[in-house]
């Protein structure tokens, strides 16, 4: 109980939220790192998954290859990158490691979503004279969007939790709160940092759930219109 009380005192102390090493700055760094890695992961994974899902070729191989990344610990990838020439380029080792970690759920969910679209609907669209790109963006993608967004949500939450490894590479983010707590032998600070990461992950989860609920009525209107 004393640890919980001390953790609450640490979190409610305004001095811990301001300054160069304050929680406010670390939170902004954490969010920025998450957004950058998520954007890069989407740029790399989604076009490949959508095209392969549309064509129905090569997707299984791509998904299986991407899933190999789940078996490799992000920390191990980060250490290897830090020991390589890439390690001299600031945040890039952390960004690369996190992007590799986020690609599998994005690629898998987008591909499965595209392949799950009713074949009769696709044939009907083609029978109406739609081109391949029109069928992809106006028929298949809207129907696959819920599963695509699920992949983005999973990747975002995983990135929030895993971005704490940036502190091990000398980067910023909420992981610095935790590592500083270990260095100071301050259990309340370590617990406070873990709580902040958990709350941020829950907030991101909530944002995506709200987005899903907001998009659901619009998708229903399109399908019944």
Image (cartoon, helix red, strand yellow):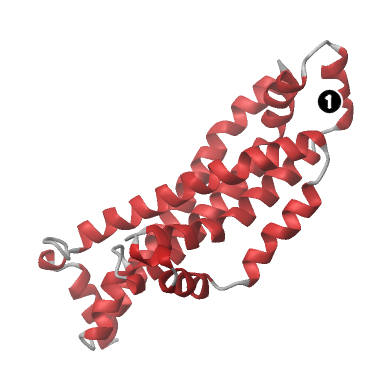
On screen, residue 1 versus residue 12, left or right, reads right
Q: Nearer the viewer, residue 56 or 22?
A: 56
On screen, residue 1 versus residue 24, left or right, reads right
Whether residue 128 appears in this view of the structure is: yes
Q: Is residue 194 above or below residue 211?
A: below
Element on which disc 1 rests: helix
Label 1, on which residue? 122
How packed mark 1 is, by other alpha carbons closer than 10 Å (few <14, some 14-19, many 20 or more), is: some
Q: Nearer the viewer, residue 55 or 187?
A: 55
Q: Residue at x 19, y 74 (%)?
A: 10
Q: Nearer the viewer, residue 1 or 143?
A: 143
Location of the C terminus (image quadrant): top right
Tell me where residue 23 appears, x and y as whole percent. 22, 63
Location of the N terminus (image quadrant): bottom left
Q: Is residue 117 above or below residue 195?
A: above
Find residue 71 and report its image quarter: bottom right
């Amino acid at each position: 109980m004393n640890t919980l009380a001390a953790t609450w005192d640490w979190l409610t102390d305004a001095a811990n939220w301001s300054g160069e090493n304050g929680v406010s700055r670390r939170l902004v760094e954490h969010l920025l790192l998450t957004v950058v890695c998520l954007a890069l992961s989407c740029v790399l994974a989604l076009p490949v998954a959508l095209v392969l899902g549309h064509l129905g070729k090569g997707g299984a191989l791509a998904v299986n290859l991407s899933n190999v990344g789940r078996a490799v610990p992000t920390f191990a990838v980060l250490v290897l990158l830090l020991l390589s020439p890439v390690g001299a380029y600031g945040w890039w080792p952390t960004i690369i490691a996190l992007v590799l970690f986020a690609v599998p759920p994005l690629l898998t969910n987008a591909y499965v979503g595209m392949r799950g679209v009713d074949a009769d609907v696709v044939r009907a669209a083609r029978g109406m004279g739609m081109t391949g790109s029109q069928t992809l963006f106006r028929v298949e993608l809207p129907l696959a969007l819920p599963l695509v967004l699920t992949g983005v949500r999973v990747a975002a939450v995983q990135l929030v939790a895993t971005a704490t490894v940036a502190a091990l590479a000398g980067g910023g983010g909420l992981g610095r709160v935790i590592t500083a707590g270990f260095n100071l032998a301050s259990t309340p600070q370590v617990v406070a940092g873990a709580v902040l990461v958990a709350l941020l992950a829950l907030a991101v989860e909530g944002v995506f759930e709200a987005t899903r609920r907001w998009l659901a009525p619009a998708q229903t209107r399109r399908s019944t219109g």
